[in-house]
Image (tube, rainbow, N blue to C red):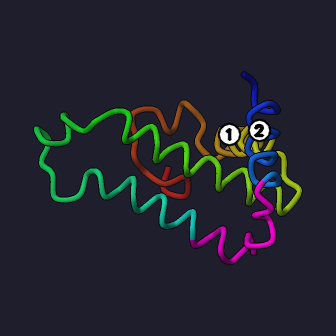
Amino acid sequence: MNYIDIHDKVISFREERNWKQFHQIKDLLLALNIEVAELQELLLWKDKEQQSHIIKEDVKDEIADIAVYLIYISEHFGIDLLEAINDKVAKNALKYPLEKSYNSNKKYNEL
């Protein structure tokens, strides 16, 4: 399944339930933040050993929830999500040239 198929499936799911009326941008952003927090909660107060036992399916579900809200937010603003990601990687490649950023955790303005 490609991105267009996923995008259309997510939007169709919402349209079939007439949920767009509830998807004000403020609420979508809050929901995104909550889903990110739910992903973080899987690691909360766990040491490295406990983190290694986190159930992959739980992480997968939270990542999917985050992706769905990103699709809704992108659709709200008329942004092609994959194009935005591609453009951002290109911008980051300019800000973090390999010869300066390799094996470094410094921010671009510190390189």
Q: As drawn, is 56 to the left or to the right of 1?
A: left
Which tag, 2 or 1, sits closer to the chain's start? 2
Camera-nearest label, 2 or 1: 2
Q: Residue at x 81, y 45 (%)?
A: 12
Q: Which mark is residue 9?
A: 2
Spatial CA distance of label 2 from label 1 is 26 Å
Q: Which mark is residue 44?
A: none
Secondary element under disc 2, as helix, strand or loop, is helix
Mark 1 Cα within 10 Å, few/some/many (few <14, many 20+)?
Answer: few
Q: Residue at x 74, y 34 (%)?
A: 6
Name the one closer to the observer, 89 or 45: 45
Q: As drawn, is 70 to the left or to the right of 103?
A: right
Three-letter code for the amino acid on which mark 1 is drawn: Val
Could you say which quadrant of the image residue 94 lies in? top right
Q: As drawn, is 41 to the left or to the right of 18?
A: left
Name the one closer to the observer, 36 or 8: 8
Name the one closer to the observer, 86 or 81: 81
Residue at the extreme right of the image, as rendered: 78
Residue 27 belongs to magenta span: yes
| Disc 1 target residue | 89
Q: Residue at x 71, y 42 (%)?
A: 85
> Which stretch is magenta?
17-30
Q: Position of residue 59 (x, y in %)?
A: 39, 41
Residue 102 to residue 27: above or below:
above
Q: Position of residue 82 (x, y in %)?
A: 76, 39
